[in-house]
Image (cartoon, helix red, strand yellow):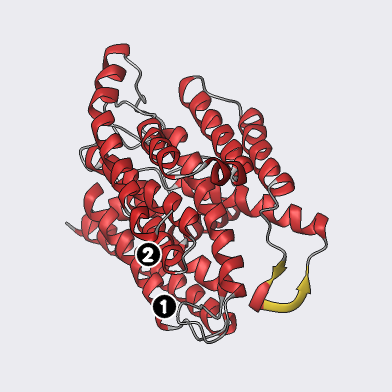
């Protein structure tokens, strides 16, 4: 597959998804298949879900057209894992799974990919170069990492446009990075998903006509996790003088996924401080905090995307610095953001009491 031709297929993915969404939305309305409002959900209207279906269909067409049989064969475990995660999300969107069923449905495709597909994190990389994982530790760490990151991405799918915008941003960055290294198959997958997600955003921007649902959020969350592992391993193997080399592989990955990682860690800590289950749904996510400050969905999304861009820019500017420099900086910035959110909310509450 020639490098120039590789750029055509994301456009095909975008067009197919763009054409499918209005048809899919109309069908779901006719079948009365909606995501119901209530409980911890923000939306107050019955809105179609399962927006992941047109996203994935667009990508599948693009990938099947672009790749040869040998390319597809080399991706067999990746494709099996993505398909199983997609089906798990679809089943949960149509008939809600119990927490145990949902966990099993997520672990199975991850284990297939890690054990048979040999997609693994094999060390602590530049964070601790001398620490090399035995195989069983490598498998456990990788399965745990993918499971956490997949669900972290799923958790940010709480307001119109957020999961799509963050997913698009990360996939675009990774796609360009892989493409620049002539890793064309990985770049194709990244950019095709980014293109289909961009089509989804047209219909998911406030006011949303369709939601991503677990069908999309779990599939894209797992994809981001796998691509991040590929990024870490590929970046680690680059020579120290390569212009695209990030000296701190793990810290760079954290910067790319900062919104889902920061959001998930933050809500877990808050719940544990209240002696609540870390899996209990509530309205303490980052996007909820911005809505509490009076932001609209669109404004909150743009602000959070802006934060993600700042962290990506920081990772690029500091690409010659070690994890010992970048990770503490990431932690300090996250603590500052959390403090500012709390400060402004308390200030608004105080003004409301005095008025």
Residue 195 location (% of width, % of height): 32, 48
Query: Which mark, by number, is residue 316?
Result: 1
- Could you tell whether 79 is left or right of 285 in the image? right
User: Looking at the image, which residue is at 67% across and 39% down?
Assistant: 107
Circle 2 residues within 10 Å: few <14, some 14–19, many ≥20: many
Residue 51 location (% of width, % of height): 36, 33
Q: CA distance from mark 1 to mark 2?
A: 12 Å
Front residue (pair 53, 175) = 175
User: Looking at the image, which residue is at 40% across and 30% down?
Assistant: 53
Asked whether disc 1 touches disc 2, contact meaning CB atoms under 8 Å apart, the reply is no
* Residue 3 picture quarter: bottom left
Is residue 275 visible in this depiction of the protein? no
Which element type, helix, strand or loop, lies under badge 1?
helix
Circle 1 residues within 10 Å: few <14, some 14–19, many ≥20: some
Seen from this angle, which residue lies furthest top? 31
Count every numbered label the image shows and give the total.
Answer: 2
User: Looking at the image, which residue is at 38% across and 40% down?
Assistant: 62
Residue named by callout 2: 308
- Could you tell whether 325 is left or right of 164 in the image? right
Residue 54 location (% of width, % of height): 35, 32
* Residue 251 picture quarter: bottom right
Front residue (pair 3, 23) = 3
């Amino acid at each position: 597959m020639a490098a120039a031709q590789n750029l055509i297929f994301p456009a095909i993915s975008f067009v197919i998804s763009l054409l499918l969404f209005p048809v899919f939305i109309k069908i779901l309305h006719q079948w009365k298949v909606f995501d119901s409002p209530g409980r911890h959900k923000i939306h107050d209207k019955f809105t179609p879900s399962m927006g992941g279906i047109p996203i994935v269909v667009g990508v599948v067409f693009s990938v099947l057209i672009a790749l040869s049989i040998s390319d597809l064969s080399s991706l067999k475990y990746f494709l099996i894992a993505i398909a199983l995660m997609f089906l798990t999300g679809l089943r949960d969107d149509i008939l809600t799974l119990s927490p145990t069923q949902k966990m099993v449905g997520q672990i199975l495709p991850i284990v297939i990919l890690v054990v048979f597909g040999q997609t693994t994190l094999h060390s602590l990389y530049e964070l601790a170069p001398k620490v090399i994982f035995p195989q069983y530790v490598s498998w456990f760490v990788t399965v745990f990492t993918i499971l956490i990151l997949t669900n972290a991405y799923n958790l940010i799918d709480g307001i119109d446009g957020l999961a799509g915008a963050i997913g698009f941003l990360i996939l675009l960055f990774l796609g360009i990075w892989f493409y620049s290294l002539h890793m064309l198959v990985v770049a194709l997958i990244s950019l095709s998903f980014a293109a289909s997600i961009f089509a989804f955003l047209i219909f998911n921007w406030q006011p949303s006509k369709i939601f991503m649902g677990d069908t999309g959020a779990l599939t894209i969350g797992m994809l981001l996790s796998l691509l991040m592992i590929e990024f870490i391993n590929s970046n680690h193997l680059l020579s120290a003088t390569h212009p695209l080399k990030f000296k701190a592989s793990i810290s760079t990955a954290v910067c790319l996924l900062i919104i889902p990682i920061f959001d998930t860690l933050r809500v877990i800590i808050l719940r544990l401080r209240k002696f609540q289950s870390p899996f209990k749904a509530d309205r303490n996510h980052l996007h909820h905090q911005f809505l509490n400050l009076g932001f609209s969905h669109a404004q909150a999304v743009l602000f959070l995307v802006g934060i993600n861009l700042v962290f990506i820019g920081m990772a690029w500017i500091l690409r010659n610095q070690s994890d010992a420099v970048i990770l503490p900086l990431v932690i300090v910035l996250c603590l500052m953001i959390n403090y500012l959110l709390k400060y402004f909310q308390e200030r608004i509450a105080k003004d409301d009491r005095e008025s």
